[in-house]
Amino acid sequence: MEIIKINQLDYELYQQEREIRNEVLLRPIGLPDYGWEHNDKEAVHFVAVKDHIVVGCVLLVKKDNNRAQLMQMAVKEEYQSIGVGKKLLQKLIENAKNQNIKEVYCHARENAIPFYLKNNFKVYDKPFVEVGVVHNFMKYII
């Protein structure tokens, strides 16, 4: 398995990434396909690829000189719990360090909190509802 940093010009990989986000994140909660792409242009995209097929993805969106937001982490169901998400997260954190980012934060769905806690993120502030689903603020200090 390989973790690759891509941009929207990597058309085939980007299209596969979009489909995983639809399948894993949007459809299960009733959001329309391609309905959460407003940060795609400025984001740094990472995809996990196995045999030329994208099996996971995550985005990093820089918010200011010191902070960036992890967004749209998605791993195909059959590849969950085998380290794909951890590898994506490691590549994202490495990239954030290279940009001198000091904090990466995310809005984590409740079912994803154990994953982020295992990977040294901390919960902060109170839970909130986003797109009809309870989320928690989480952050990783670099």
Image (cartoon, rainbow, N blue to C red):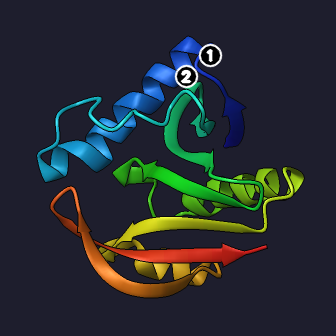
Foreground of the two, 20 or 107: 107
| Placement of 52 over or under 90, stated as above or below | above
**Label number found at residue 33:** none
Q: Secondary structure at mark 1?
A: loop
- The reply to whether callout 2 and callout 1 are in contact (CB within 8 Å) is yes
Foreground of the two, 94 or 101: 101
Tell me what residue is drawn at x 35 percent, y 30 percent.
19
Give the side of residue 136 with respect to residue 55, left or right: left
Tell me what residue is drawn at x 45 percent, y 25 percent.
16
**Label number found at residue 13:** 2
**Label number found at residue 10:** 1
Q: Position of residue 83 (x, y in %)?
A: 59, 63
Q: Position of residue 10 (x, y in %)?
A: 62, 16
| Placement of 113 over or under 93, stated as above or below | below
Q: Position of residue 82 (x, y in %)?
A: 54, 63
Give the side of residue 21 with respect to residue 118, left or right: left
Say which amino acid is labelled 1.
Answer: Asp
